Every structure is written in C-alpha cells, then in structure tokens.
Image (cartoon, rainbow, N blue to C red):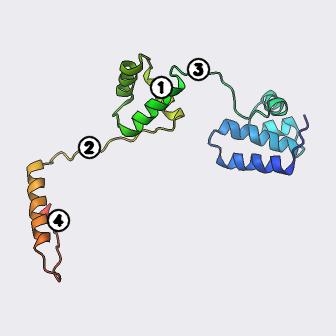
Amino acid sequence: MKITLSEEQKQKLEEQHKTERDSRICDRIKAVLLASEGWTQKQIAQALRIHETTVWGHLKDYLLQEKLKPSGGGSSSKLNEQQTIEIISHLEKNTYPSTKEIIQYIQATYGVSYTQQGMHDWLIKHKFSYKKPKGVPAKFDKLRQEAFIRKYEELKANLKPSEVVLLSLSSF
C-alpha cells in the first residue's frame, strides 16, 4: 500500500512521534512514515516486530481516516462534562490518600459508582498522579519541636548585626 505524504505532513508526524507517549501510536506513525518512504508492508512489519496484517490495518486507517490512535473501545464516562469539571476542580484543591476516598466522595456527591481500577483509569485520563505521602518521623515530639522553634526565634530576634546562629547536630 503506497502512501504519499507532503513535507508538511511528514514534519507533523515526526513532531508527533517525538512527543507521543503511547507506543502504539508511535508504531502507527512509524508505519505510515516508512510506507511513504517506499518500505513494503513486510519490511515495516519486520522492523516494528508486528504482523503484516497489523501494518496493513494501520496504513488503511491512516489512508481512509488519518487515524493514528488505536480504538480499543472502552466505555463512555459515567460522569457528565459538568460533573467532570467539578470533580477535577475539587481534586485540585483537596488531597485524598487513596482512590477509595475519591470513590466515596463521587458516590456521595453524584450517586455515581466507580471501581478502584475505574477510578485509577479516570484519574490517569485526567492527568492526575499519585505521590505516596511522607510519614511523620517515629520519634516526633511536638512539644519539644515547639520549644525548639520558640527558643530559635528568640535567639534570632536578639542577634547583633555581626552575629550568626550556628546549629549542631546535637541540637536536633
């Protein structure tokens, strides 16, 4: 299957390939670019380590629809557009320790139920990521810390212009 691309189309595909994170889309772009350079489907399949019929499908999809994204189906969102905007805004202002709490919030607010995997996928789709919270040191003593801070602030307040505060590790 022969594909003819303009220089502008090639440049656009090259740029998209550089920034694309989905390797399936990258494979489709490479198949289209290689086909435009005169490679056979067999050569493309061998280079990309995929089946020839897969290459044929990629090229056909591009020729007919300029389609590069795989359409694996998936389901439609359980939330409407307004609910999605509200939840995104809420999540940007509030931190949750796990998806369970987010699921509970959505269930209580909108009456929509998600599985943990479904919520995980929803969060990824909307560019959220998980960062493990940092724990409080086991030997943390709030009263000692407050006393140290008071003493330190008092010491700083009474410094002469030529003096500096030095702390030793035994201070901690």
Give the numbered dot on residue 76: 3
Label 4 neighbourhood size at 10 Å, few (<14), some (14-19), many (20+)? few
Q: Nearer the viewer, residue 110 or 116?
A: 110
Q: Residue at x 17, y 81 (%)?
A: 161
Which of the two discs, 4 and 3, sits closer to the camera? 3
Q: Residue at x 41, y 16 (%)?
A: 111
Q: Amino acid at mark 3?
A: Ser
Q: Residue at x 15, y 60 (%)?
A: 172
Relative image position of residue 139 (x, y in whole percent): 15, 48
Q: Is residue 16 above or below residue 77?
A: below
Q: Nearer the viewer, residue 164 or 132?
A: 164
Q: Gap between marks 2 and 1, in whole Å?
A: 33 Å
Q: Earlier in the sequence, mark 2 or mark 3?
A: 3
Relative image position of residue 124 (x, y in whole percent): 51, 34
As drawn, the residue found furthest toward the front would be 82
- Note whether residue 47 is visible: no
Q: Earlier in the sequence, mark 2 or mark 4?
A: 2
| Residue of label 1 | 83
Which of the two discs, 1 and 4, sits closer to the camera? 1
Which secondary structure, mark 2? loop
| Residue of label 2 | 135
Q: Gap between marks 1 and 3, in whole Å?
A: 14 Å
Q: Amino acid at mark 2?
A: Gly
Q: Amino acid at mark 4?
A: Leu
Q: Is residue 43 above or below residue 82?
A: below
Q: Gap between marks 1 and 4, in whole Å?
A: 51 Å
- Note whether residue 40 is visible: yes
Q: Earlier in the sequence, mark 1 or mark 4?
A: 1
Q: Do callouts 2 and 4 mark residues in contact (Cβ within 8 Å)?
A: no
Q: Residue at x 68, y 35 (%)?
A: 24
